[in-house]
Structure formats: structure tokens, C-alpha cells
Image: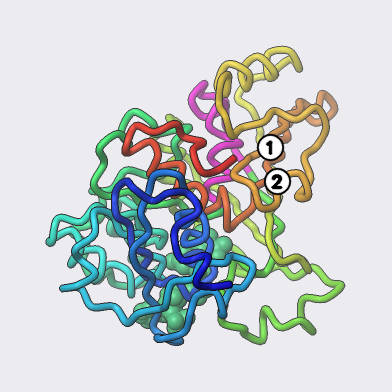
Amino acid sequence: VVEKQLSQPGGGQGPTVGVIGATGFAGALAAYLLWRHPRFNLTYLTGRSEVGYRHLDLYPRYRVPLTVEELDLDRHGEVEVAVVAYPHGASAPVVKALRDRGVRVLDLSADCRLRSRERYEAYYGSHPHPELLGQAVYGIPELHRDRLPGAELVALPGCFPTAALLALAPLARAGLIADVVIDAKTGVSGAGRQPTPFTHFSNVHASVVPYRVASHRHTPEIEEQLELLGAPLAVQFQPHLVPLDEGELLTCYVTPREPLSAQALQDLYEAAYAGERFIELAASPPTLREVQETNYCRLLAVYDGHTGKVLVFAAIDNLWKGTSSQAIQCLNAIYGYPEDEGLC
Ligand SMILES: NC(=O)c1ccc[n+]([C@@H]2O[C@H](COP(=O)([O-])OP(=O)(O)OC[C@H]3O[C@@H](n4cnc5c(N)ncnc54)[C@H](OP(=O)(O)O)[C@@H]3O)[C@@H](O)[C@H]2O)c1
């Protein structure tokens, strides 16, 4: 059965791609999406553990029959593109080495996302290669599409910043945000594959667990990008773990600078996302089931005349639009392919 599956179902005649860190959740999904993609030629997968295992045996549902290899930059630096799915801190040295060899890189970690070294170091500690900061295109195509064609280094956003920025960008650009509280619920896959007491079934099952109170690492990323959109402000961001595998729902409570009619709000969001393949403006509050295992973000913005607040709901799958399928959307944009190729 495995022998029959050895050629890429998508064809794989185009640019060569490797996935570094394909034993982890995000890298494994990237491998799945690239293996099936009609253009890209997935040539290798690496892992730190489980070297010599078939990916197929680690993640049967993804059905990628390549063997996990140990990273060897001399060999693995031969591809045109590398997707690096390492944790922050471990990622930067690999990204740097690949860039020095002329490899185009999509980094899923936080190591290239921020422009400000101070912001990075306040939340992550010292940066192994601070010269990488500010070099990458921030990989949300709906916000940075013009910089993606031909890009050599793309930093995929954190999952929460993807949802938060898509939810808030129309208001930020219009200068309408005086203050915002972002309340998030997320499934456990956001914490990666290694189990911890925090993500243990007994801690998560039938419960809701607030975590990283007033200190989550995605806060500076949301703030930096909002600033670039025209809304420099301190953001109150609070995530909660819920007993789910994949998916996250954000509710943003915005104090607007001026009262907004329901129609004005609707017009703002429709104008911002007209023609966007992967943004859906929902008629009622979005739920996780509507986006799980898809590259879609579903949004709803509502004006509450009683409090004068704007509520914006955003639902995404953290592993898909929150990282790996968004990476494929970016790759398509880099090469000028339709953004939804391999993602429908
Ligand atoms: N999970 C999400 O929803 C999500 C969303 C957005 C962004 N991201 C980002 O994507 C990256 C990967 O996340 P993940 O959830 O896939 O994590 P994960 O499941 O823990 O996988 C991490 C991968 O990196 C490897 N690795 C771990 N520590 C390493 C080290 N010190 N040196 C070299 N390799 C190391 C692991 O190898 P072994 O397992 O073989 O040891 C594995 O292949 C992270 O930077 C994360 O922040 C994740």
C-alpha cells in the first residue's frame, strides 16, 4: 500500500520544498498540505526525534510516506524553499543558516515576526540572531499581500495574532480603536506535541483554564502589527485553554473612538474583506466547527448601543489558518499561484 503512495498525489513538479521539524504538529500539517499540493515538490522531512520513522507511521491520517531524516544543512540546504517548524530560539540559527545558503524560508516560530528587539527580548529572552528581526514579511496575506510575491523570508504569525489582527484591522486602519480587550479560547494543539501537566487530559477535560495572565507572548506581536495599521495602543490579551484539539475563538471588546452605526460597521468590514477567498463575514457569531481543518477565518463585528462597545468575533483553526495552511497560502502568493491552490 505504501509503495503505491510513493509518488506525490498532487504531482509535485514545481519548486522543491523541505519541512524542518515535521515531527511536530505544525510541521506535520505543513508536510500533509505540501504532499498533496499540485505544484510543490516535497523532497524531505526532518525531525529531532523519530529519525528513520516513516511520517506515515507517526501521523497516519496525513498519509505522507516520506521518512523522517536528521537535519543536515549541507544536504537539506539544497531545496528552493524550507518551512521551519521549530520552537522560538531553536528556529533562528536554522533560518539564518538556510538564508545564508540562499534558501527561501517560511518560519513558523516567533523568531522573525517582530521588528523590535526590545519587544522580542522582553517576552522571549535574548535573540540568537537579532539581525533577522525586521527582515521578514509578516505572513498574513490579507494584510501584507503586496510584499509576498518573490519574498525570501516570511514569518508566519502566531495563531492568536492571526485571528486578532484579522478581527481588528478594519477598525485599526480607520483609526477607530481607543481601547481593546481580547479574550481568547483555544484548543490544546496550540501548545505543541509534547504533553505537559498543563495540557494533560485531567487538567483540560470539562474545564476552562486561563493561562499566561497579563503576560502572553503574542501580546507584543499584536501590538506591533496594530501600530503598523495605525493603532498604537496597549492591548489587554487573555487566552483560555478549552477541552478541544484544534481551533480558537477570539472575542475582541473594542471601545471605539466614536459611536458607530451597525451599517457603518458592516460597510467597514465588507470593504476591507471584499473578494478575500479565506475571510467570511458571518451573519451570526462564528463557531469553531465552521473553521476546523480549514484555512478560513470567520468574522462578525457587532455594535452594542447599550455600552457603546464594538464586539468582534473571530474563529480560526490554530494549526491551519493559524499557521500551516496560512504558510501554504503565503507560498502560493510568493510564487504567483492562486492563493487557494492546494487548500480547497
Ligand atoms: N501549534 C500551533 O497551533 C502553532 C500555531 C502557530 C505557530 N506555531 C509555531 O510553530 C512552531 C512549531 O509548533 P508545534 O506546535 O508544531 O510544536 P511541536 O509540536 O512541539 O513541534 C516542534 C518541532 O520542533 C522540534 N524541536 C523541538 N525542540 C527543538 C529544539 N530545541 N531544537 C530543534 N528542534 C526542536 C520538534 O522535534 P521532535 O518532536 O522530533 O523532538 C518538532 O519537530 C513553534 O514555533 C510554534 O510557536 C504553532
Residue 215 drawn above or below residue 8: below
Q: Closer to the N terminus: mark 2 or mark 1?
A: 2
Question: Residue at left 68%, top 34%?
Answer: 299
**Residue tagged by mark 2?**
291
Q: How is the image coloured?
A: rainbow
Mark 2: amino acid: Val
Lateral position of residue 86 relative to residue 33, left or right: left
Residue 113 drawn above or below residue 275: below
Do tag 2 and tag 1 residues touch (Cβ < 8 Å)? yes
Are there few (<14), some (14-19), or many (20+) residues within 10 Å of tag 1? many
User: Which element carries disc 2, helix, strand or loop?
Assistant: loop
Confirm whether residue 286 shows in the render.
yes
State the mark number for residue 298. Answer: 1
User: Which element carries disc 1, helix, strand or loop?
Assistant: strand
Q: Quarter of the image holding residue 130?
A: bottom left
| Quadrant of the snapshot with the N terminus | bottom right
Judge by depth and name the residue closer to the eye, 96 or 178: 96
Question: Residue at left 62%, top 85%?
Answer: 196
| Quadrant of the snapshot with the C terminus | top right
Judge by depth and name the residue closer to the eye, 124 or 51: 51
Magenta-colored span: 160-180
Q: What's the CA distance linking mark 2 and mark 1?
A: 7 Å
The x, y position of residue 55, in whole percent, is: 50, 75
Judge by depth and name the residue closer to the eye, 302 or 337: 337
Q: Quarter of the image holding residue 148?
A: top left
The x, y position of residue 39, in whole percent, is: 39, 44
Mark 1: amino acid: Arg
